[in-house]
Amino acid sequence: MNKLDFHRPASLAEALALMPASGDGGQAWLAGGQSLLAAMKLGMAKPSLLVDLQDVPGLCDIRVETGPDGAPALWIGAMATHASVAASETVRTFVPGLAALAGGIADAQVRAMGTIGGSLAHNDPAACWPAGVLAAGATIVTSQREIVADAYFQGLYTTALEAGELIVGVRFPRLQGLHYLKFEQPASRFALVGLAVAHSGAGQVRVAVTGLGMGIVRWPGAEQALCGHFGLPALSAIAPESLQALGDLHASGAYRCHLAGVLVRRCVAALTGEALPRPAPLEPSAVGPVPAPPDTEATPKDGFGGRQLLAAPPPQVWQAILDAQNLQASIPGCEALVQRSPTAYEATVKVGLGPLSVRFQSDVTLRDLQPPHALTMVFVGQAGALGCGQGTARVRFEPTGDGGTMLHWWVQVQLSGRLAQFGNRLVEASSRKLSEEFFERFGRVLGVPAGHLPPPSPWHRLQRLLARWFSLFRK
Ligand SMILES: Cc1cc2nc3c(=O)[nH]c(=O)nc-3n(C[C@H](O)[C@H](O)[C@H](O)COP(=O)(O)OP(=O)(O)OC[C@H]3O[C@@H](n4cnc5c(N)ncnc54)[C@H](O)[C@@H]3O)c2cc1C
């Protein structure tokens, strides 16, 4: 247990006065503790100040009020637990689908303690509430402002909240219907994939998908199809494979896309009362492993990989990736990086995502050097009591013919200790976020503005995983 200050204020004004306006990230609101305390136990969050919200009056309120547009709106206070939302007659009457969503979260113990505000602030990439809030087009009301859902969710564990900003409650507009379904990860009941469809009387339809890997997203293809005609026939031509989804231990990206296609049909059928046709048999390719980059030779059985297009020739990229200063500038949270020899580095990396923070000490050795064509990086990383990890990254530099380089990589990793127990969903998801940052930074180091890079594709999503390596096991 780390030393910390704990306060349990009895009013909103007292709570806000306790929280420094521009925190250094060491201060946290405490709701039900269902995510924060677990992260603290694992050493992944180390707040120096906890402000417990459970005695603040009014934060658990659930009511129908008049919204800013004069229409009735549903208000759910930030400290309303999932159980209280599920049981609320007000919610069941106003948007029954939200009560059902809350009732499907986790187990009875978690529902009794976990809150809508904590869930939205944490913004877990597989959480249920973000799907309901984004599909409904709700507004998150904080101690400082009102944030529409489209602007609030900003990716993995990332929201528009500023340090110390408190979610006071969420305002939901009147909807004609909202339905949320998830295909559960059976151990936690988090969504392997979860999907919410909301439609208003004005013919507007919003579809939000959770569990695809990088945080909650809308599905424009399904929305457009359903706006024309709200019913199952409108979904005949949607292309779930156009969604960007990442694979992990539990499911491949292709399987997650397939699930989204199944869930959107089931949600629409639930809202329209249409009968679902018998499901077509799965194409084997829809449930198979994520394919390797087509031009990666001899793809190993385990691991993951991707490609990155860089606007510099291979010799320049080769030099850049071996340069300690460039690496330090590219690795998110890299506090120190020392080159011990031409082929060995040591690095200290602090990984911070939302309330989570872990410091890794890593040794990196370069092997099988074939300049400027290929190399292998061997990583060994220690995260103290959390355990350690080791892995290899095979990197290949392919000239593109127009002076650029296509970087191909394939990574294999083994975790041990608590990282292995806890890490699969959280660490892998976190790694994707960090790898995205790594390649954005590396592109900038090479003088390639981010806008010149091609738009994200499934492969570009996968490449983010490489940054995990740099971030988690380098130092
Ligand atoms: C075993 C298990 C299974 C779960 N399964 C699911 C599931 O199936 N679906 C699902 O959606 N979720 C699931 N969860 C998550 C659960 O729903 C919690 O709601 C969520 O973890 C947030 O917990 P909390 O409300 O206690 O917030 P806390 O853990 O107390 O806080 C989480 C974060 O939010 C911040 N925070 C809290 N309140 C506020 C506020 N008002 N304003 C600003 N910041 C705030 C905290 O500082 C902290 O950073 C599961 C959790 C567990 C432990």
Image (spheres, rainbow, N blue to C red):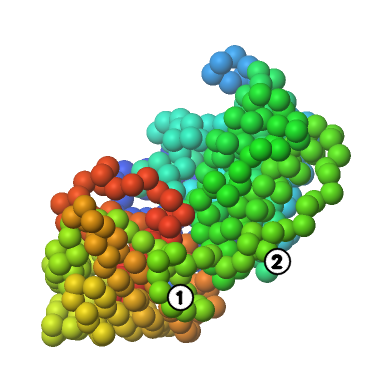
* Side of 228 where 473 appears, left or right: left
Q: Secondary structure at mark 2?
A: loop
| Quarter of the image where one finds residue 225 | top right
Q: Position of residue 33 (x, y in %)?
A: 55, 60
* Side of 355 where 219 appears, left or right: right
Q: Which residue is mark 2?
A: 186
- Nearest the viewer among 147 and 82 is 147
| Residue 393 visible from this viewpoint | yes
Q: Position of residue 28 (x, y in %)?
A: 42, 54
| Quarter of the image where one finds residue 391 | bottom left
* Side of 250 where 295 appears, left or right: left
> Can you say which quadrant of the picture contains the N terminus?
bottom left
The amino acid on which the numbered mark 2 sits, given as a three-letter code, is Pro
Distance, label 2 to label 1, CA atoms, is 30 Å
Q: Which residue is mark 1?
A: 299
- Nearest the viewer among 234 and 175 is 234
The 10 Å Cα crowd at callout 1, few under 14, some 14 to 19, many 20 or more, is: some
- Which residue appears farthest toward the top when viewing the image? 70
Task: Give the residue at x 45% y 82%.
Answer: 414
Mark closest to the chain's N terminus, 2 or 1: 2
468 shown above or below 366: above
The 10 Å Cα crowd at callout 2, few under 14, some 14 to 19, many 20 or more, is: few
Q: Which mark is residue 264?
A: none
Which mark's residue is nearer the viewer, 2 or 1?
A: 1
- Which residue appears farthest toward the front when viewing the image? 401
